[in-house]
Amino acid sequence: MTGTNSTQPAASPTVPQEILHQKITGALITQMIAVAARLGIADLLKDGPLTAQEIASIRNVSPEAVYRVLRILAAEGIFEESQDHRFHLTPVGDILREDVPGSLRMWAMLYGADWHWAAMANSMYSVETGEPVFPHLFGTDTFDFFNTHEEHGRVFYGAMTQLTQELLPVLLESYDFSPFARVVDVGAGHGSLVAAILDRYPNIRGTLFDLPVVLKHASEFLSRAGVSERCELVGGDFFESVPRGDAYLLKFIIHDWNDEQSRTILRNCRDGISDNGRILLIENVLKPLNQPCPGKLMDVTMMLMEGGRERSEAEFSTLFNDTGFKLGRVMPLLGSMCVIEGVAV
């Protein structure tokens, strides 16, 4: 980052009214980041600073509006404005680029999507009824919605892939997959998780298991990753059964569902797992009372979208005990995200 006359973002507020006001208006920052992500502004700036006029000309949008958005984001440290009104990338803004490891561009677009905001705007419905508001608003669950609305699905599955890429280096350093002959990714999406494991461990074979409509792009992804010959694709419904394997991976699957639904999924995994097999849940593990925790925010998202929930370590242990597993290790990854290991008993 080469901006001139650099200034630091304003100090964090300390007066209670300032603190609450900042949190109330924080949703506007989310939306402005999403606008920058949709326009691919970080990608435009990777080769050097540009003015708002130059960005607007490239993207065919309003120069004045672009400037006002970027001015907010520069105050937040995402971009930096120099005295000649050119905008520069910062280390934070750099991860809004499409082509960098750890990119959060799709994640920003996901949280700024109109359907996501509609659910949040109607959160009182879930508070009053205890039911997810998304099906109430859209007449279907989120998975059918993503599978029938191609652009929304592209953003959602892209965000999930980006999150996987963010977690992978820590996961591969933290957990030894070498004892397993076959790893089954349950709810696999495009397969980036298993692809990375197969790349690291040449003797392991993999299975991607998901709804057939979700797997339609997986073959191409596995071919690009160079592991397609060691990985089979199996379409199905994890509420009915899962393919056999030595280790099961479920990344952000169990948090989609209530306890009874989660027990059904875990029992089906227990029926298919080999002797002494392992099940690895990649989920948020809630931190103790009064501690900040990204999982507590995600918990409300799950309440609105699917009626699912985030859980504590004790709650995961109970789910395992009810379904033929016992809790093994809980290994931190990033933030409140952890690997929760279940041992088949």
Image (spheres, helix red, strand yellow):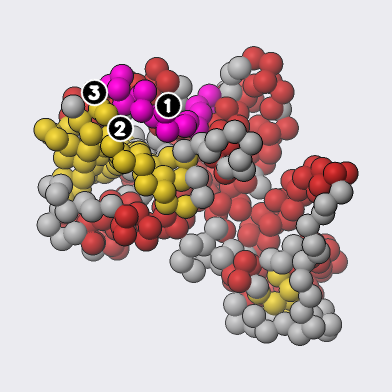
134 or 129, which lies in front? 129
Judging by the rendered image, the residue that carries numbered circle 2 is 327
Q: Residue at x 55, y 35 (%)?
A: 288
- State the image coordinates of residue 100 (x, y, percent, origin top left): 49, 69
Q: Seen in the image, is 317 located left or right of residue 78?
A: left
Q: Could you tell me how many numbered marks the image carries?
A: 3
323 lies above or below 250: above
Q: Label 2, label 3: how many angstroms apart (C-alpha)?
A: 10 Å
Residue type, mark 2 in image: Leu
Q: Label 3, label 1: how many angstroms apart (C-alpha)?
A: 15 Å
Q: What secondary structure is found at the residue carrying circle 2?
A: strand
Using the rendered image of the protein, determine whether residue 141 is visible from the camera's viewpoint. Answer: no
Q: What's the mark number on residue 324?
A: 3
201 lies above or below 338: below
Q: Seen in the image, is 183 located left or right of residue 289?
A: left
Q: Is residue 321 magenta?
A: yes
* N-term-proximal mark, 2 vs 1: 1
Q: Residue at x 26, y 55 (%)?
A: 197
Q: What's the mark number on residue 315?
A: 1
Q: Given this view, does label 2 or label 3 mark the residue nearer the observer?
A: 2
Q: Residue at x 71, y 70 (%)?
A: 79
- The segment highlighted magenta reads 306-323
